Image (cartoon, rainbow, N blue to C red):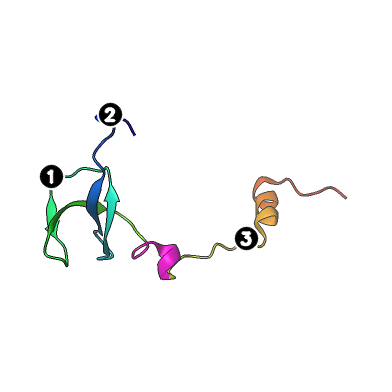
Amino acid sequence: MKSGIHPEYRPVVFRDKVGGLAFLTRSTATSSHTAEWEDGRSYPVIDVEISSASHPFYTGNARVMDTAGRVERFQRRYGLAAKN
């Protein structure tokens, strides 16, 4: 890599506001907020709205949409029944 043209790549804590999950990874994202990690060091923290700890697909709270009868419902609603 050329020096001086790339953003700094450093450890950052990503924290889910709702699920309470936090993980330390490396990123170029910046933040003025810091958080103390388990190792005693302070890292920049990025708050995210959703992660695997709060996403309905991963938590098992996903709603299953009923797809049976959708075509019939559409035809009934708009009067486009098949002609025999």
In-front residue for pair 3/76:
3
**Label of residue 32 in the image:** 1
Three-letter code for the amino acid on which mark 2 is drawn: Ile
Crowd rating for badge 2 (residues with CA inside 10 Å; few <14, some 14–19, many 20+) = few
Give how far across and how far down residue 2 sits, in percent: 31, 30
Marks 1/3: CA–CA distance: 46 Å
Residue 68 as seen in the image, left or right of residue 13: right
Asked which secondary structure carries label 3, the reply is loop
Residue type, label 3: Thr
Tell me the magenta residue range: 52-59
44 within the magenta span: no
Label 1 sits on a secondary structure element that is loop
Q: Name the residue under label 3.
A: 67
Q: Are marks 1 and 2 in contact (CB under 8 Å)?
A: no
**Measured from the top left, where is residue 78 in percent x and y?**
66, 45
Quadrant of the image occupied by residue 17: bottom left
Mark sitting earlier along the chain (1/3): 1
Q: Quadrant of residue 39?
A: bottom left
Label 1, label 2: how far apart the Cα atoms are: 22 Å
Can you identify the residue that label 2 sits on?
A: 5
Q: Are marks 2 and 3 in contact (CB under 8 Å)?
A: no
Mark 3: few/some/many CA within 10 Å (<14, 14-19, 20+)? few
